Image (cartoon, rainbow, N blue to C red):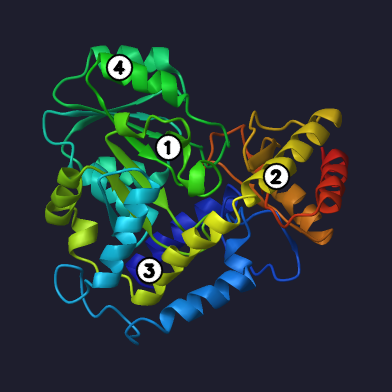
Amino acid sequence: MTELSRLLEAKLKQRQEENSLRKLTNTSGLVDFTSNDYLGLARSEELFQRINEQLKTLPQTNGASGSRLLSGNSQYIEQVEQKLATIFKSEAALIFNSGYAANQGVLACIPRKGDTIIYDELVHACIRDGIRLSFAKHFSFKHNDLSDLEKKLKRSTGSLFIAVESIYSMDGDECPLQELVALAKRYNAHIILDEAHSTGVIGPDGAGMAVSQGIEQQIAIRIYTFGKAMGCHGACVAGSKTLIDYLINFARPFIFTTAMPNHNAAAIDCSFQFLKSNIDLQNTLQQKINLFVSLGKEMKLNTLNSNTQIQGVVLPGNNRVKTASEKLRSKGFDIRPILSPTVPKGSERLRICLHTFNSDEEIRNLISELAIIE
């Protein structure tokens, strides 16, 4: 065994001893309560056909062949960006290959040395990684605690940036966006809003939280992800034309990566067209959420304080939550354990994602099984 292999084995052994070792699994045949396919678009046969029909109208290529700044740009992807800007009510939009790349690119290149980034302590890893690549100072603030945020704003210097999510991926709770906008305005701070888990599920045409509340123009930078409720892949940054021009020139994950091929862009385009004509999917999802929340309260489950499609039952301890997940799997439910250190120790939980395609009977059966496990 080489020295490198010994080092890697030691880290893996430590994970195993903590019962936090990650492994890839296959879940065919189980009831899906784990994917981010909230509106069922990833499995929609009708949408699949629409995408294929759209592809017939486009140049038949297998790949983009280069970055957007070289050979990877096309008139079609620019048209899709214009459509996205209209949906998100922004001057412009710029497509990235993933939400991870978009967040990383924005945080790494916009805040500069002497500036300050203040971020919610529960933001996604991609935001944290972008912050680490920035030369700006950075602090976290307590989750959704605007009093703590204001304390940090008072002692910050340079241009101020506040990084938050509209719906948080592990707790499923929402950002107090109206109040945050008012606070940011008082301190002349710029909000960077990740709309990953609100894209599609709320707002007109699936435009997310900021648009649904009519405050999109008061938020400097918005990131939308298409690999969740929209059922495809990729992301975009929405904002001013100046912002987009800046990212084209300075965002390294955009500049130095191969562009997405036309079939990815077509999937994004068709997904939003499909949702526009099937917007009742949002109401169907809300009905599923209401049912789960009401039954969870009735059975006195230790659920998260969430009224979104991301729910959870807290079962402290990696061993306990992994055992619970395995029991549910044996009953036919695909529900993943969220272990520490992904979440703080003592708050390990079963993360439960609700979808339009989950039947009421499946939700009732799941609640019954959770009551036995708890």
Rounded to the nearest angstrom, the CA distance separating label 2 from label 3 is 39 Å
Callout 2, which amino acid? Val
The image's mark for residue 340 is: none
The answer to whether the residue labelled 2 contacts the one labelled 1, judged by CB atoms less than 8 Å apart, is no
The answer to whether the residue labelled 1 contacts the one labelled 4, judged by CB atoms less than 8 Å apart, is no
In this view, 37 is above or below 18: below
The image's mark for residue 152 is: 4
SS class, disc 4: helix
Q: Could you say which quadrant of the image residue 138 lies in? A: top left
Q: Residues within 10 Å of mark 1 (few under 14, many from 20)?
A: some
The answer to whether the residue labelled 4 contacts the one labelled 2, judged by CB atoms less than 8 Å apart, is no
Rounded to the nearest angstrom, the CA distance separating label 4 from label 3 is 40 Å
SS class, disc 1: helix
Rounded to the nearest angstrom, the CA distance separating label 1 from label 3 is 23 Å
Q: Nearer the viewer, mark 4 or mark 3?
A: 3
Residue 97 at x, y = what percent?
A: 34, 63
Callout 3, which amino acid? Ala
Mark 4 or mark 1, which is nearer the start of the sequence? Answer: 4
Q: Could you say which quadrant of the image residue 327 lies in? A: bottom right
SS class, disc 2: helix
The image's mark for residue 321 is: 2
157 or 363: nearer the viewer: 363
Mark 3 — residue?
Answer: 265
SS class, disc 3: helix
